[in-house]
Image (cartoon, rainbow, N blue to C red):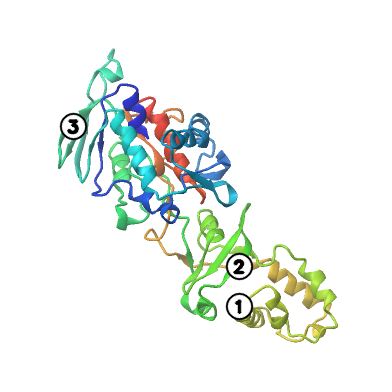
Amino acid sequence: MCAIQAGQRGRSVVLLDHSKKLAEKIRISGGGRCNFTNINTKPGNFISANPDFCRSALARYTPQDFIALLQKHNIGYHEKTLGQLFCDDESEAVIAMLRGECEAAGVKRFMNCEVGEINYAPPEDGQQKQEQHRFHVSTTRGEFNSASLVIATGGLSIPKIGATPFGYHVAEQFGIPLTKLKPGLVPLTFAPDDWKPYADLTGVSLDTIVSFGKQSFRENLLVTHRGLSGPAILQISSYWQHGQPLHINLLPDCDMLALLTEQRASKKLLSNYLVLWFSKSFSEVWCAQLTEHNKIENKPLNQYNDKERKQIAAHLHDWQVIPSGTVGYSKAEVTCGGVDTRALSSKTMECIAVPGLYFIGEVVDVTGQLGGYNFQWAWASGYAAGQAA
């Protein structure tokens, strides 16, 4: 996106890519159909130490702008849940579109190109920034000199398709600070002994509200052999802090205290009653854990007193679990944290202390929620830098 914009402005652009395959992250996204944006995009859908940083770029390149680009290329798309937009055909259509736009803008592209050394000569007084070559980049495909250098290398997530810490190393070389890095949009794990009762429930899916702090998401939760996954968990994982509990409302559409009170004459076991909403296996394991940790027995509904009914309802609406960690960058969709936004111009993505050096996309401390937001940040930040570099 950045290369397209700069090329269309008449700049001489070279795109250096260490991968052998073009845009693998686009190709695998959205189950192969590329969840390319979200029509509900707003600054509140992004996490950053500076929540306002993303406002300028998002306002100047919107989901409608990217949709217009798709329409120009006759690429069909459709909306799924929560404003997520997907290609009708495979992700390759978006890759081909962007490749074609680059070629039309005169962008030269070198694939399988390893960058060795980057040298920088600060601008001299009185010279316009685009009049001199300040960056010298040594690569396996030759030597390159440029007035501007844009780092669009992503984060640490999914190393098997090429993720590396290259962008962070460039930032460190130039003294640009980084915020703390961690896997985001990632399944959560639990200590094996703690999770043992649930491990056999792999594949069980529940409609829940998962909360941490002031943030909550209502989507499906998925039980895995190591912990929890599914959209609700991936969303909250970017906010979750190690050692802290997650709050899970297992029955967001029910008033369980009222329902249990209505059933106070019933001789049905609690676990058998809960199969109205849960699988029998999950209901039995959950009730067994309720007994073990909260001393509330799984017994006929008519044997509970008012206090016990309140406790059961409270645990169903606020099931608290403490993950031990995440499955790591190998399965994380994004990297939280990155180049400190205080070091960048929010309008152009240029480093304040290093004229001509830009950082865009996931390498920056701006992380979108699940559902097309990270692609929109890529397009918007790329557009912003491409208009200035």
| Amino acid at the residue labelled 3 | Phe
At x 52%, y 63%, the residue is 230
Viewer-side residue, 200 vs 312 = 200
| Quadrant position of the N terminus in the picture | top left
Residue 205 image point, x, y percent: 57, 69
Left or right: residue 114 compared with residue 23: left
Q: Which residue is mark 1?
A: 282
Mark 2 and mark 1 in contact (Cβ < 8 Å)?
Answer: yes
Q: Which residue is mark 3?
A: 144
At x 52%, y 34%, the residue is 64
Q: Nearer the viewer, mark 1 or mark 3?
A: 1
At x 84%, y 80%, the residue is 264
- Disc 3: CA contacts within 10 A as few (<14), some (14-19) or many (>=20): some
Q: CA distance from mark 1 to mark 3?
A: 60 Å
| Quadrant position of the C terminus in the picture | top left
Residue 158 higher or lower than 19, as above or below: below
User: What SS does tag 2 mark?
Assistant: strand
Compare marks 1 and 3 and give the one earlier in the sequence. Answer: 3
Residue 80 image point, x, y percent: 56, 51
User: What SS does tag 1 mark?
Assistant: helix
